Image (cartoon, helix red, strand yellow):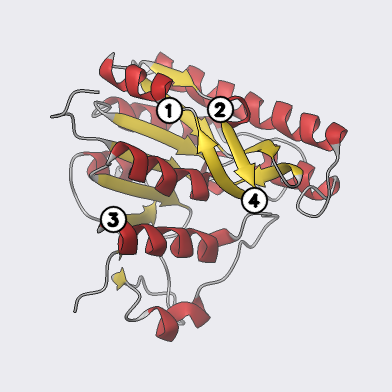
Amino acid sequence: MTSDQSITILKIGGSVITDKSVDEGTARLEDIKRIALEIAVSASGLVIVHGAGSFGHPQAKRYGLTGRFDPLGSIITHISVKELNHIFVDALNAAGVKAIGVHPMNCIVCDNGRIKDMFMEHIRIMLESGFVPVLHGDVVMDTVLGTCVLSGDQIVPYLASKLGAQRIGIGSAEDGVLDGNNKTIESISSTNFDQIKQFIGGSVNTDVTGGMLGKVLELLNLSDTSNTTSYIFNAGNAGNIASFLSGKNIGTAISKAEH
């Protein structure tokens, strides 16, 4: 990775590219195609992480992977999320993005559900070479649990820290983090988090990784340790991803507290 290359990490939520209300993988193909075309406009120095949606959460829940080790359940869930990754990467390449799928099972080890180590050299070389690495929520090996469910929401801040990312966007199915009146909260930091956390819930549909609250907590921790601001916005609205990638700040900003 060249020193002057600006890195952007874009997370696309599983609720945007799949139907999370079903128990088996159902991709939203038209939305995936639209998103791929928006990404194609500005894909330089980009790393993508996408959620698993109905290609991972129902399977992980069915086999109880958040509470116990199940080899068969781990395999079935991993195969399912790889299928979604394949669909998404194919759409990106069809749109002109030089995308390559990167499966966390093959390069990440966790310790009791938290990332312990990740092989990063291939991602750095991909970026140097003009590729767009596409990671996803996955089942990975865990030194304590055997395997664990690893959310893309944990992968994003880890990558951002290791790569020194300048911009982070979390494309969700909402206009950002919403308050009690369903209005978008403009900014969140450790200063106002205690006042607004009552409004931040989990996912309406099956989600084994913490929903919106999990996203906010991961990004708050990143902002406090790296001074990086992240933006949670609605990737379901046409044009929002292209706007974010072009430099526009939209949705809810997650940033370091001002003193």
Proximity of marks 1 and 2: CB atoms separated by less than 8 Å: yes
Q: Quadrant of the C terminus?
A: bottom left
CA gap between label 1 and label 2 equals 8 Å
Q: Earlier in the sequence, mark 3 or mark 1?
A: 1
- Residue 227 falls in which quadrant of the image? bottom left
| Residue type at the position of mark 3 | Ser
User: In the rendered structure, which disc, 1 or 2, sits on the residue that comes first in sequence?
Assistant: 2
In whole angstroms, how far apart are the C-alphas of marks 3 and 2? 24 Å
- Residue at x-position 54% and y-position 35%: 136
Q: Residue at x 62, y 43 (%)?
A: 110
Q: Position of residue 219 (x, y in %)?
A: 40, 59
Q: Which mark is residue 107?
A: 2
The three-letter code of the residue at mark 1 reads: Met
Type of amino acid under label 4 = Gly
Q: Residues within 10 Å of mark 2 (few under 14, many from 20)?
A: some
**Residue at mark 3:** 226
Q: Disc 4 designates what residue?
A: 113
Task: Label 2: state its secondary structure.
Answer: loop
Residue situated in front as seen by the camera: 141 or 31: 141
* Element at label 3: helix
Asked if disc 3 and disc 4 are in contact, CB closer than 8 Å, the reply is no
On the image, the x and y values in percent for residue 222 come to 37, 57
